[in-house]
Image: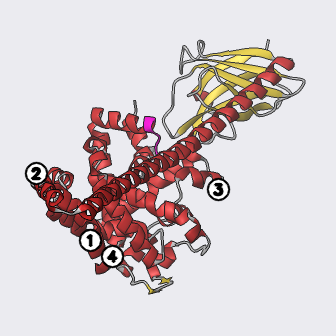
Amino acid sequence: MDIQEYIASGKLELFLLGELTEREREEVLELAKKYPEIQQELDALEEAMFAFDQLTGIAPSAKVKSGIFDSLEEEFRNTKGEEKSVEAPKIEAKVVVHSAFWKSFAVAASIVAVLASAVAIYFAGKFHDTNQRFTALLQEQQVLADNLNQVKQEYEQTDSRLDRLVSGDFKRVEMLGEALDMQKDAKVDVFWDQGREEVFIAVNRLNSLSAEFDYQLWAIGPDGPVGIGIVDPSQPFNLQQMNAVAEAGAFAITIEPKGGSEAPTLEKLVVLGEVA
Amino acid sequence: MEEGQLIAGLRTRDRKTVEYLYDKYSTALFGVISRIIPDRDIAEEVFHDAFIKITNKIDFYDESKGRLYTWMANICRNSAIDKLRSKEISQSNKTNTIEDFVYGFESESGTMEQVDGIGVRELMNQLNEDQKFIIEYIYFKGYTHSEISEEFDIALGTVKSRVRAAIQVLKKNLDSI
């Protein structure tokens, strides 16, 4: 797997922004464990995101801090009070023994009040958790819908190509590299419907090229070669639609500088196939 | 304080550790919230709740899934986004832009003091238009990447790579400020 490409995809940034699904999160964590480069990039990004927040951040006012620590006071006391709680029941027992009837009633009432608050807090917490999970689900659903949409588009594209292929009058022209010096085992098929002037190609075998070059398809007709599109070698056995052609005696592919050329570079002829 | 020590202290609800956490991270975390919510009073209210949530939920934090800061920042960001979408704010219909943030903006309760204006302005000027747009929507308007893709009809992959490009620019230039 290409680690640089993975890093460049932007997935790690979304991971840190908390926008990935649970499954994608697992994937990032696993890869980070496996590849130190990914872990390093995550560390550097976290560092940068913190630095950005710190630089653009403003200190909240002092009353916020005191407000927060007042709210947390009970939290702090509860944990420290664990040891003391052993003494508490004794005191309560004495109170009950020495008190009049209304005092025990008051104790019972406070116990009920405490229980009721505990139940209220418990359900408030539950509600909050559920709410959060619901939001997470909504986000996940959004991502799923996006994926589905993409798959649907791809399916429709493929489906319409197949329709045209089946309903049309396509001739198959095999282009081979056997007789040429560039790539002996290269093989690309052209499907040509002369009546409707439609051309599809399917790459069977074609080496990949460096970024400065492209494969260009030529239709060789009565007026010489005409460039009819760039061929993507990375999608073997996938139909790619090319430009329209009405007249051709042969098809060929050459290697051209990125984006294609006006006229073919004949020394870099990779495959050639004559129309039978 | 080491991060491990900090987390252990938080788990025992140790007051000193919580104060240390506050002093070290409150500026950055409040920054996360206040750039999404321009009204200072509301932003502080959201920050209050988010910080309490952080201390209460620390037992759910899992160190193997990322750093403490990232976890806290996401709690703050999500709280701010929730607030932003609640009725209370959407009625006042005011959201942030980078320009507001950099040049200072008025909150309903008065003028919010400016962040270190020049440094931030320089940093933002390093971004090209696409990157500025992405940062504005993700950091200042609280959009997710799929919402940007949908609302502005930009392919998901393009949004992703622009997020990366923008953060790379910030990352590179943060050191020089």
Residue for badge 1: A70
Which chain letter goes with mark 1? A
Q: Is residue B60 above or below residue A109?
A: above
Q: What amino acid type should be assigned to the residue bearing mark 3?
A: Glu
| Quadrant containing the C terminus of chain A in the rendered view | top right
Q: What amino acid type should be assigned to the residue bearing mark 4?
A: Pro
Q: Which mark is on residue A86?
A: 2
Asked which quadrant contains residue A194, the reply is top right
Q: Is residue B116 above or below residue B22?
A: below
Asked which quadrant contains residue B115, the reply is bottom left
Q: Which mark is on residue B151?
A: 3
- Label 3 to label 2: alpha-carbon separation: 60 Å
Task: State whether discs 4 and 1 lie on one chain.
Answer: yes
Q: Which one is in front in this view, the residue at disc 3 or the one at disc 1?
A: 1
Kindly identify the residue that appears in the image at 76 percent across and 15 percent down.
A172
Horizontal and vertical percent position of residue A148: 63, 35
Q: Residues in magenta?
A: A19-23
Q: Is residue A39 in sight in this rendering? A: yes
